Amino acid sequence: MSEDPGTPPAGAAKDWTIPQRWESYTPEDHATWDRLFERQAQLLPGRVTPLFLQGLDILRLSKPGIPDFEELSERLMKATGWQVVAVPGLVPDSVFFDHLANRRFVAGNFIRRPDQLDYLQEPDVFHDVFGHVPLLTQPVFADYMQAYGQGGQRAAAAGTIAKLARLYWYTVEFGLVRSGDALQLYGAGIVSSYGESQFALDDPSPHRIRFDLKRVMQTRYRIDDYQQSYFVIDSFEDLLDQTLNTDFGPIYAELADAADIETDAVLPSDHLYTRGTQAYAQGKRSA
């Protein structure tokens, strides 16, 4: 993505939104959604934060077929003042941040093919809606997402988007949350993935590290496979508090001259829930 919004693609508005065109989905498209939904709905209870499951109920996402964004937005607006808007795919950073800052969540209006159930590089409607939108019904998380968008606008002006992107990746996309002595899923990239929903909690390979804002913003991440480290927040309230009450300027200045932390690194200062074996990543490298 680029800080320069450039020119929207043909058929898109200036803010890169497009009509969802719900009536254009084929029976196969709806069947793909239903298949993806069913297996995640069976897998996630007991693994995902209960707030996510509450969001599914609030939004009535168990209704068969790809959701109509207009209906979805009506329910979401009543809950937290957010809405879902369709886009043709990934959008520039500045556009993305502006939508979040104004409580609009952008969602791809396309769905993966049946032969892509387990992996799709570009986020589709299942990842965006099933993975992200349920937690937007929860006021604290909804406020965090808006605060992140506002922080993104400031980061864009300062040229520090790359560091802030890591915060989104390790929380919104691939975050874990503590629940007593247990860990639960909440990141959209995990909860929308059948394989990673199991790997992130059960596999001995990844590190599971207590969330530290600066540490996260200094850490590289994987875009091509399961994560080698997951960061665990104490609560959504704490995540929002740190986002709202931290002066990011000194962190950006400090990280400008600091070396990145590798995805599999463990630091002496880390609070570890699990020290991973890294066997999965090592096995992929040697294959």
Image (tube, rainbow, N blue to C red):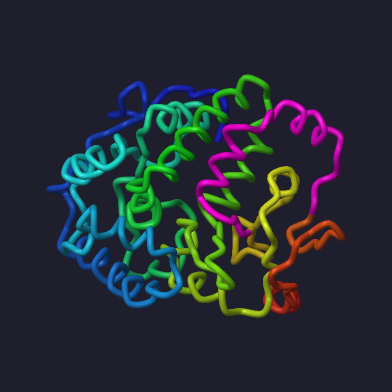
On the picture, is 182 further left or further right than 47?
right
On the picture, is 23 further left or further right than 241?
left
For residue 251, above or below residue 114: above
Q: Main secondary structure of the magenta part?
A: helix
Question: Where's the N terminus, which quadrant?
Answer: top right
Range covered by the magenta-colored residues: 232-261
Q: Position of residue 201 (x, y in %)?
A: 56, 74
Q: Which residue appears farthest toward the front when viewing the image?
A: 180
Q: Quadrant of residue 235?
A: bottom right
**Is 284 part of what is drawn in magenta?**
no
Q: Position of residue 206 (x, y in %)?
A: 67, 71
**Is 253 part of what is drawn in magenta?**
yes
Is 45 or 42 nearer to us in this picture? 45
Is 242 or 85 nearer to us in this picture? 242
On the picture, is 30 further left or further right than 274?
left
Q: Where is residue 142 in the image (x, y as percent from the top left)?
A: 40, 41
Which residue does the image show at 21% across and 64% down from the upper left?
62
On the picture, is 131 further left or further right than 93?
left
Is 88 or 48 nearer to us in this picture? 48
For residue 145, above or below residue 98: below
Is 167 or 85 nearer to us in this picture? 167
Q: Position of residue 59 (x, y in %)?
A: 23, 53
Which residue does the image show at 69% across and 69% down from the upper left?
273
Which residue does the image show at 73% across and 43% down from the upper left?
214
Which residue does the image show at 50% across and 32% down from the upper left?
149
Q: Quadrant of residue 104?
A: top left
- Marker count (numbered): 0
Residue 85 in sight here = no
